[in-house]
Amino acid sequence: MTSKGRWTLVFLFLSMFIFCGCWDRTEIDERAFVVGVAVDLAEATETNGSKPPSPQHFPFIEKEAGDTSLTYTHKQISYLMTVELAVLHALSAGPSDGNKEGTGDPSWVIGATAPTIQAASTAINLRVYRPLFFGHQQVLIIGEEAARENLRPILDFFTRHTRTKRKMRIAIAQGKASDILSIKPRLEALASVYLFRLFQSAPQHSLGLDADLNQAIVSLHSSGHAVISRVRRSLDGQEAYNGGAAVIKDWSLVGWLEDIETQGYLLAKGVSSSGRVSIPVATRPSALIEYVYHHCRTKTNARIEDGKLSFEIELCLEGFITEETAAADLTTEFIGWVEEALSEEITRRVHMALHKLQKTYGVDALELGRHLEISDPKLWERIKGDWPQLYPTVPIRIDTTARIRRTGSTK
Amino acid sequence: MGIPSLTPGQTTVMITEIKDGVHDMIFRSLFSSPRARRMRKAKPPADQSRLQSEPAEAVSLTIEVPDDLDKALDIVRAIMCDCDDLQVRKVTIGERGIQVAVLAIEGIDDSGRIDVSILRAIAVDSREAPGAYTTPRDVFDRLYDQTLNTVTVHTETDIRQMIEAMLRGRCAIIVDGVPKAITADVASIPGRNVSEPTAETIIQGPRESFVERQNINTAMVRKHLHTPDLKLKRFDVGSRGKNAVAVMHIAGVTNPALVEEVYRRIEKIEVDAILSGGIMEQFIEDDWLSIFPQMATTERPDAVVTALLQGRVAIFTGNTPLVLVVPTTLDHLMHSPEDLYQRWQVASSVRVLRAVAVFLSLTLPSFYIALTSYHAEMIPTTLALAIGASRQAVPFPAFLEAFVMESALELLREAGIRLPTPIGQTIGIVGGLVVGEAAVRANLVSPTMVIVVALTAISSFAIPHYPTSLAFRLGRFFLMMLSSALGLYGLVIGLMIILSHLSALESFGVSYLAPWAPFDAKDIKNTLLRFPLHTLTHRPSFLKTIDQRGQSDAQSDRPKTGGGHSDV
């Protein structure tokens, strides 16, 4: 290499620092941190569109016979996207901060209506000069109406975008999603962080779900079904309430599971690590025995007996008694009775959930089809096509064993 | 050789006739640079006339000590003209009144050894045994054999050699009528006493460090290793200031090829003077372009002894309290002598901690820049919001902020070193606390940046070898530039560049990343972790020692549970 060429190289290398090829560089304080997004259906109207796709540009669209007009009817959907932005200087209210900067509201909820999420976020940028940054988005709340319409166009933006976090929690709001984001939580500065923590805590009680975007996307893309978190405002409207679950079928919301049904569903799926069940004492119906399980083992078996397909779900729970208001003597016989009663109650809850999923919605959320495929691939190959019709009719037997490990100190 | 040999008489004539010119000529011949000498060798010796026409080329001659004392003194004075620190004391001794001159350079015998060991000894002895002081020859022999109370006594026939010995701290004694001179060791050049190490302080272990006097330094190593196998070879390096360089190794352990290579590199040095070990290091190192030190420097005798026993070579440069140890590896530079004195669990965890410190001091600011400027999604949300909030009012981009703060830190460090200790501490407090706090309050830097800078500084001080920590500091700025332009991508590119450079680097034939690259499982026991001492039976194999074992297996036979040394 000539010395001139070498110097040119050196210059080019150095110019990297001088002219700072920082096309990607956005300082952390120059971003608008989107911590939460709520998507609602703004309107869905039948419109006479004026720009149908032109057949010569889209040769794969077959031109319908007799379609001579250039207008056709389609459903025009537009979304109200509400984002919660973290107001950074309001967050810096440290104890050492002398200047009174950390006094404002750290949460800024702002929304825009547009036919796509990208259009809405651009529309928000007309009012927020900093680029919206979705890298720290904690929650995605989708309104009931929008979810009933179709989830696919909404989720597309959040999965396609490379800088969104797949770990963000996704939930369907009962009612309007934007209402949830405007909650003023007491423990956290930002509603989205509060919601995130709320969803995260669901495994403690198993009455609600903790579903992140990744799980939902994987499930939706493989079968079109999913069971994801449900959220609504609490009765006084001050807090969010994470109980129950939303059932998605073919990318659309079909209905809900209530709190106890959600627990049953999670137990049947084998992902409920902790929760409580209570039973009335036979001798004193007003008195209750509270049982908290901390361990649950679930086994799902596919059975073929006399040419008939059935499933068996075995549950084995282990827990302890935390409260008992009957002042009963906890003898071995009594504990044996309690264990039996608990097993019955748990079976009932699981059964409720399965009945709803199976008969009402026809959603194979337990992935019984996959269990069958694993245990008997040949049979599965034969009935695969009829599975959606077959599934609601398959008998499912539930066999629960609840064990009491400790009763606690009584004196 | 075509060099004319002059008789003493001729020299004197020349000196008296053209004193200054001749002085110049003789001086040049005495202390001419090796380069000039080599040039002379390269020339064909046939060209006599040209040789004579150039005075500088003329004399590489022996100037014999003349019989006559006055003549001898004239020659010495001529050579050493304009050297006002030349001291000449003429005494007359014996019944015959034989003249004796004692010559020395002022200040070399600070404690008055010339007075006691030479002059008083001569005076007392000549009075007590006047019979031995009859002829000049007798006087000379008596002085040489008996009178002078010094450890080493040499005779010199060459005035040139005599003067050189004087310049090195000996005194010369010339007896009138004898064409020889005695030189006796009287040097007690004032120097520092052995004191506690300042740069390599440890808690458990010896608390002595090397001083500027080389003979004391080598003696401190000898003190640990009482074996004639510990070899010491001296070199005189430098043409104007001849600095004695001593090279130590253990025969039968150290790879002879390595020793030869060290000798060869030292002999190749042609320079006016070597002032310090640091200069020595730069003359004999493998790669002058690298920012990484390719030899370990230490001020601790125990560290040198450990290195010698491992099969390394120690280079003692005169007038330097630092000893060079070659070859070294990056891993070796990360070790502190204390690692061997502590229990192995403690030593191992400290070494892991140091590895973390290296990583932090090299990458932390660039990591901060990359994450805050490019990859905000990679920081945990709460932290990201906190960092963003703390940077709200800061007007600079993160990389500028980091550069300013890191430079300020280096500035403080530099200022702290130059200033006397009490002021240095003040600077530290003013700089670290006041300026830092004020800068944060004035929203010039974010508090997070202050934490990053402080953590980086602390990490870099946790590296035991100071020059290595300097290398990592330079590397840090390099990485900061890259990551400010290219984010994490740049940071990784920078780390790759540093890593590939390190793996290409060698120190006296040993790969700098040994024993990791090339990997040798045998040597891993004493690297990032320090295994129990009884398992470290072999010397590092990359040093290619003659005797591989440094320890027998006897120690490893001891029972696993205690009680091996119970009082039976």
Image (cartoon, rainbow, N blue to C red):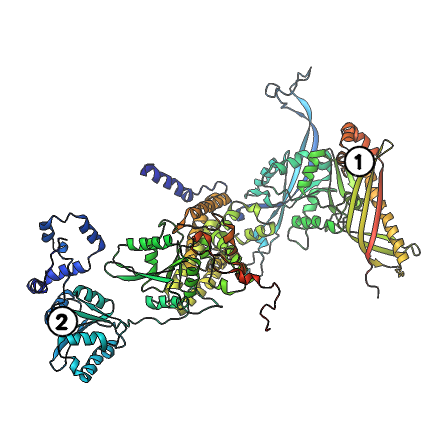
Give the structural element (helix, strand or loop) at label 2: loop
Crowding around mark 1 (Cα neighbors within 10 Å: few <14, some 14 to 19, many 20+) is some
Residue B150 location, x and y as percent?
A: 26, 74
Q: Nearer the viewer, residue B492 or A310?
A: A310
Name the residue rendered at 83%, 59% in the picture: A407
- Residue B494 image offset from top left, x and y in percent: 46, 46
Q: Residue furthest bottom?
A: B128
List the residue tagged with mark 1: A361
Residue B446 in sight from this viewpoint = no
Q: Amino acid at mark 1?
A: Tyr
Residue A276 is situated, as x and y percent measured from the top left of the image, at 80, 52
Residue A304 showing in the rendered view: yes
Three-letter code for the amino acid on which mark 2 is drawn: Val
Subunit of label 1: A
Dividing the image into 4 quarters, which one contains the C terminus of chain B?
Answer: bottom right
Closer to us: A36 or A285: A285
| Nearer-the-camera pick, A311 or B272 | B272
Callout 1–callout 2 Cβ contact below 8 Å: no
The local crowd at label 2, few if under 14, some if 14 to 19, many if 20 or more residues have their Cα within 10 Å, is some
Q: What residue is shown at x 77% (from left), y 31% (from top)?
A: A380
Locate residue B112 relative to residue A302 in the image: left or right.
left
Question: Which numbered disc, 1 or 2, marks the residue closer to the eye?
Answer: 2
Q: Which residue is mark 2?
A: B178
Give the tally of numbered discs.
2
Q: Is residue A142 above or below residue B84?
A: above
Q: Is residue A182 left or right of residue A265?
A: left
Q: Quadrant of residue A62?
A: top right
- Left or right, B301 with reference to A212: left
Q: Is residue B302 above or below residue A236?
A: below
**How far apart are the alpha carbons under marks 1 and 2?**
126 Å
Q: Tell me the SS state at disc 1.
A: helix
Q: Chain of mark 2?
A: B
